[in-house]
Amino acid sequence: MNVATATAADVSVCRNASVVYRSGEAEVQALVEVDFAIAAGESVALQGPSGSGKTTLLHLLGGLLVPSAGEVLWKGEPLSSLDAAARGRTRAGGIAYVLQGSNLLPTLSVFENVAFAAWVAERAGLPVRDDATELLRLVGLEGKAAALPPEISGGEAQRVALARALAQSPELLLCDEPTGHLDSDTAARVLDLLEALQERFGFALAIATHDRGVAARWQRQARLADGRILPAGAP
């Protein structure tokens, strides 16, 4: 879906968005005039090699980054023109992340990592989907509630990260190479779980991956190269 076909059902939209990183006198075009939209409940894979712009596009969609040119909308309202604090409030109200590394707090137990995310959401006046015990049950880890993150496997850590993200009742879940550090069997189990959770709760999902097999699991694929979204059918 490009901007020309974007509709009121879209939760996040980039319009003619470019991102330029500067290092000294050098400039790197991370994204070049990208038009992209993701609809409520849709699953989209952003597929491409390292450096193609996948993570930058995810960060734009979630308001972690503002474009150098163009704009980003969240549920039809400007996002990229907001200040950092306002973008943070918008993210807290409907956008969650799962990163390649689970980024769990290492001194908190599995239960406490999920409960802390739910507590933060509740303190901000946001809906909390379920308590931490129920969320861990959904991802099959209620038996690991007392374990510390260093005591669990990489696949289990990613499942905890999914439970933590669900605590925020997201309308949009952004996943950046969530299986990049996992072996193929563990990665498949994590992706099966992610697919089941997306079907159950109906959040929009954007997942960045370099793996064409992973990309093919989702409703739509957007292929990126050199900061641009490739036309359908491009080699």
Image (cartoon, grey):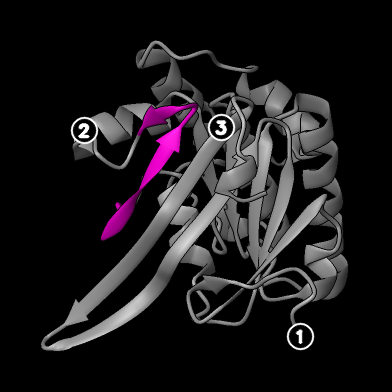
The percent coordinates of residue 147 (x first, y second) are 62, 45
Q: Secondary structure at mark 3?
A: strand
Mark in front: 1 vs 2: 1
Query: Which amino acid, mark 1?
Result: Pro
Callout 2–callout 3 Cβ contact below 8 Å: no
Residue drawn at x 71%, y 42% is 144
Q: Which mark is residue 11?
A: 3
Q: Which mark is residue 235?
A: 1
Q: CA distance from mark 1 to mark 2?
A: 41 Å
Query: Which amino acid, mark 2?
Result: Ala
Indicate left or right for 6 with 143 as reference.
left
Q: CA distance from mark 3 to mark 1?
A: 29 Å
Lower sequence index among marks 3 and 1: 3
Q: Secondary structure at mark 2?
A: helix
Residue tagged by mark 2?
Answer: 85
User: Extreme left residue here?
Assistant: 24
The percent coordinates of residue 9 (x first, y second) are 64, 26
Q: CA distance from mark 2 to mark 3?
A: 20 Å
Up-down relation of residue 61 to residue 186 (above or below): above
Indicate left or right for 160 with 27 as reference.
right
The percent coordinates of residue 208 (x first, y second) are 62, 62
Q: Secondary structure at mark 1?
A: loop
The segment highlighted magenta reads 66-78
